[in-house]
Amino acid sequence: MSEKKEFDRDSISNTLIIAIGLSLVCSIIVSSAAIVLKPVQEKNEEAFRQRIILDVAGLMEPGGDIAELFQAIEPRMVNLETGDYTDAADAERNVPIPDELDLAGIGQRPINAPVYLVMNGDVVDQIILPVYGKGLWSTMLGYLSVAPDGNTIKGLRFYAHAETPGLGDQIDKEPWRALWVGKQVYGSGDEPQIRVIRGPVAAGAQNPQHLIDGMAGATLTGNGVSGLVRYWTGPHGFGPYLKNFREAG
Ligand SMILES: Cc1cc2nc3c(=O)[nH]c(=O)nc-3n(C[C@H](O)[C@H](O)[C@H](O)COP(=O)(O)O)c2cc1C
């Protein structure tokens, strides 16, 4: 009578077979989960982006249906160099930013960038621009809302950064956010004049319409916000696009 062969737990080959088998099964489970969950993740990212855009536009209602509220917003692509709308869908291709112009510290920017128009019937009510750049510790990503005069700021909202809580993270808190509303990006020329200064804007300061109070203990983050807003509204950013609005207004 043949004896049943026992599984030898200590043999090297069996240990290897079990280890390899187990890693195969695990990797199949992980990659299938990644594939299955990708569309859900993309949908969530899109909803998050739409919520932030609605928020900077002042259109976010508590408990509101994001997709429905977002119907009031018209996404368009802009060729940054010409400032004209384009049908090119890709925001992937990049051009390097010359060092002397790189106030945002980002090294490169896309050829075409999205803008989000808040419409009031057929009339543009707000122009929402994606803006990003280096702070003290992190790349800060946000949206800037500009009035249809192409000059007056209606809101600035950051949604991702890693500046220090209580110091640099004031960028996304009231009352600092509120200081931007109503400020003017440009004076008589095409170079942005807006900037965050160190400390509060003094009574009687010259051209206070371009100046934002610095955040206490976070001058460096404030400099980063200055730089990125000036870059993205400047001649290498959305400057040519915003100029079309200033000239039409
Ligand atoms: C732990 C730590 C975290 C800091 N985080 C920030 C920050 O997020 N943003 C910032 O501008 N400065 C930050 N600072 C302070 C800067 O080093 C610098 O002192 C400050 O920006 C100067 O601003 P003030 O001139 O308003 O004091 C931090 C300092 C320490 C020690």
Image (cartoon, rainbow, N blue to C red):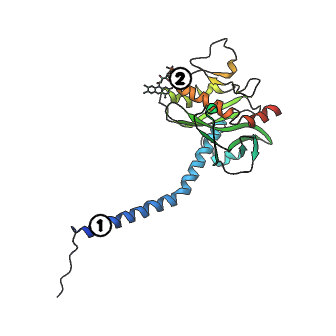
- Sequence-wise, the earlier of marks 1 and 2 is 1
Number of the label disc, if any, that sits on residue 219:
2
Q: Residue at x 71, y 27 (%)?
A: 191
- The answer to whether residue 2 shows anywhere in this view is yes
Residue 43 horizontal/vertical position (percent): 58, 52
Residue 226 horizontal/vertical position (percent): 61, 27
Amino acid identity at mark 1: Leu
Q: Which quadrant does the C terminus fall into?
A: top right
In this rendered view, identify the residue nearer to me: 188 or 58: 188
Number of the label disc, if any, that sits on residue 185:
none
Q: Residue at x 60, y 44 (%)?
A: 49
In this rendered view, identify the residue nearer to me: 62 or 187: 187
Amino acid identity at mark 2: Thr
Q: Secondary structure at mark 1?
A: helix
Q: Which residue is mark 1?
A: 16
Residue extending farthest bottom: 1
Q: Residue at x 57, y 48 (%)?
A: 45
- The answer to whether residue 65 shows anywhere in this view is no
Vertical placement of 28 versus 231: above or below?
Answer: below
Q: Quadrant of residue 182?
A: top right
Task: Estimate the spatial distance between the alpha carbons at disc 1 and disc 2, rounded to whole Å.
Answer: 58 Å
What crowding class fits label 2: few (fewer than 14 Cα within 10 Å), some (14-19), or many (20 or more)? some
The answer to whether the residues at label 1 and label 2 have Cβ atoms under 8 Å apart is no
Vertical placement of 82 versus 40: above or below?
Answer: above
Residue 165 horizontal/vertical position (percent): 47, 30
